[in-house]
Amino acid sequence: MGIRGKKIRREKRKALQEPTPPVWHTPYGKIRINRPPRRCTCCHGRGVIRCAVCEGKGAIRATGNRLRNFIHLNRLVGSQWTSVEVYNGHRHHEVVELKGSPKKKKNMMQVRMRNCCGEQEDFWISVEELKNKMIWRMGWETLEDIEKANGGPLMDVRLCFRCKGGRILPCVDCGGEGTIPSYEPLHAV
């Protein structure tokens, strides 16, 4: 049973412990009325809750939940990379050479990168730096994303798929009403 079912069972047990409502005499016979609706405990009567996926920010990570790029060392040479910030005047780079051994701790693995646009300039960086998604992105980012960055760092966000950027959702427990009806049925005495 889920969390919502457990809440309903807890509320039913609580309702059974409360005193019985008074009897009303109607032309159709004696009846007991439902208890008045209560304020929702989940949304506190507002009818909306904060989105749990984006935590109320309206945006989530665009490149997945991993903070690191997964690198295959045997396929690294010839792979294409995009730097998050402008690096040596360019963003698009390609791995030309791999140096070092993965087994030796002293000899850190390094890669020689070459920019793909304009004059070709080479530079060396460590493989650990290449794994960091805050500095490098695997593959080439689109020109549209780079133009959105306007010379600054590339943003790693997209709209939340759950709230569509609205940051809030209707409450599941009360259905957006803000009140929870009583679970005691209307019955004849």
Image (tube, rainbow, N blue to C red):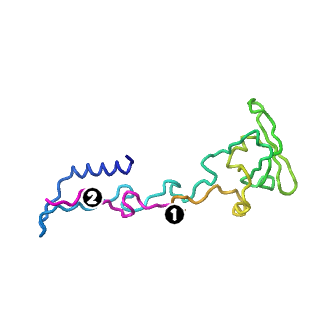
Q: Residue 59: give x, y in percent of width and height.
A: 57, 58
Depth check: 172 or 136 in front?
172
Residue type (three-letter) at the residue carrying disc 1: Gly
Q: Residue at x 75, y 39 (%)?
A: 73
Residue type (three-letter) at the residue carrying disc 2: Ser
Q: Earlier in the sequence, mark 1 or mark 2?
A: 1
Q: Residue at x 22, y 61 (%)?
A: 34
Pointer 2: what residue?
182
The stretch drawn in magenta includes residue 171: yes
Residue 172 in which image quadrant? bottom left
Q: Residue 84: give x, y in percent of width and height.
A: 71, 53
Residue 89 in which image quadrant? bottom right
Q: Is residue 58 above or below residue 79?
A: below
Residue 146 in which image quadrant? bottom right
Locate residue 35 relative to residue 67 in the image: left or right.
Answer: left
| Mark nearer the viewer, 1 or 2 | 2
Q: Residue at x 23, y 58 (%)?
A: 185
Q: Which mark is residue 166?
A: 1
Dominant SS of magenta comes to loop
The answer for how far apart the CA atoms under marks 1 and 2 are is 31 Å
What SS does tag 1 mark?
loop
**Which residues, given as a range, are shown in magenta?**
167-189
Locate residue 115 relative to residue 168 in the image: left or right.
Answer: right
What SS does tag 2 mark?
loop
Depth check: 124 or 24 in front?
24
